[in-house]
């Protein structure tokens, strides 16, 4: 078998289980975990600190070119560390009240161009990359690609549980903005829209428990040569 790049991508909409699967795969494969969405959240924090209007595309583009985003890639960590120009991103990073600004930043061609090289640089020795365009744009030659999906109501419940587990109150309206509205923004945007790659393995995470989902994905990785074959 020829050498296979040790890159696995996990894409899908908010609340579909990307991080759960990505972390499990990264730990099993002993690879870094790259949450590509953290780059856009980091840029969102930079925009908040600069007081930028989400409608000011030129200002967002200039900010993206000047901002340095650093993310942790340890799959065993409960939550990846994110620094914006050397400073911790803080609670604004995952505040659902910032969903509108996050959507604007994620849809900016200039922002996406600015973070592409840093995202790829983290995978020079292989990685599991989680996001919305990892298999189509960031790592189109990945050895294995997954696309996760689940009904909106299921994904909203999961996101609410995440917020409560982190000690933040969940608001139905904010959740709809972060999950449903962001789905539409990501799917409809011109630049790197949310869509499955042609060679992707689709998984409906509403039809599998976590253990079954991870086992299924690991079997696919094993078939691709990323794990040793099971002993007979």
Image (cartoon, grey):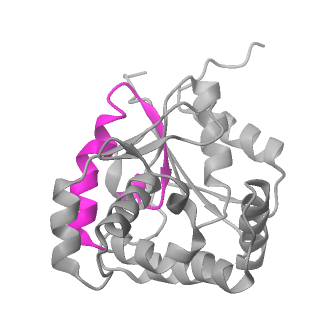
Estimate the x, y position of residue 84 in percent, counting from the top left.
Answer: 35, 49
Classify residue 80 as left or right of residue 67: right
Residue 29 vs 63, above or below: the answer is above
Foreground of the two, 23 or 133? 23
Point 32% across, 67% down: residue: 47
Estimate the x, y position of residue 197 in percent, counting from the top left.
Answer: 44, 60
Classify residue 211 as left or right of residue 203: right
> Picture quarter containing residue 216?
top right
Residue 73 vs 149, above or below: the answer is above
Instruction: Please check the rendered image and state whether residue 109 is part of the magenta-colored stretch, yes or no.
Output: yes
Estimate the x, y position of residue 71 in percent, counting from the top left.
Answer: 42, 41
Classify residue 219 as left or right of residue 84: right
Q: Kindly give the residue lying farthest to the top in the view shown.
A: 231
Foreground of the two, 165 or 148? 165
> Picture quarter containing residue 203?
bottom right
Classify residue 216 as left or right of residue 141: right
């Amino acid at each position: 078998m020829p050498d296979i790049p040790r890159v696995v991508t996990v894409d899908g909409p908010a609340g579909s289980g990307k991080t759960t699967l990505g972390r499990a795969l990264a730990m099993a494969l002993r690879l870094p975990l790259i949450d590509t969405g953290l780059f856009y959240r980091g840029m969102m924090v930079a925009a908040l600190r600069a007081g930028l209007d989400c409608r000011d595309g030129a200002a967002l583009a200039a900010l993206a070119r000047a901002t340095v985003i650093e993310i942790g890639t340890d799959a065993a960590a409960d939550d990846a560390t994110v620094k914006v120009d050397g400073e911790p991103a803080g609670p604004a990073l995952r505040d659902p009240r910032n969903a509108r600004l996050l959507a604007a930043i994620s849809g900016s061609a200039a922002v996406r161009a600015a973070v592409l090289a840093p995202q790829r640089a983290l995978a020079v020795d292989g990685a599991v990359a989680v996001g919305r365009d990892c298999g189509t744009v960031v790592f189109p030659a990945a050895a294995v690609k997954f696309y996760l999906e689940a009904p909106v109501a299921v994904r909203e419940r999961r996101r609410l549980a995440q917020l409560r587990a982190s000690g933040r109150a969940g608001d139905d309206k904010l959740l709809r903005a972060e999950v449903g509205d962001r789905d539409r923004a990501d799917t409809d945007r011109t630049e790197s829209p949310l869509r499955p790659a042609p060679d992707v393995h689709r998984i409906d995470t509403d039809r599998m428990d976590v253990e079954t989902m991870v086992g299924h994905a690991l079997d696919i990785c094993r078939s691709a040569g990323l794990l040793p074959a099971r002993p007979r």
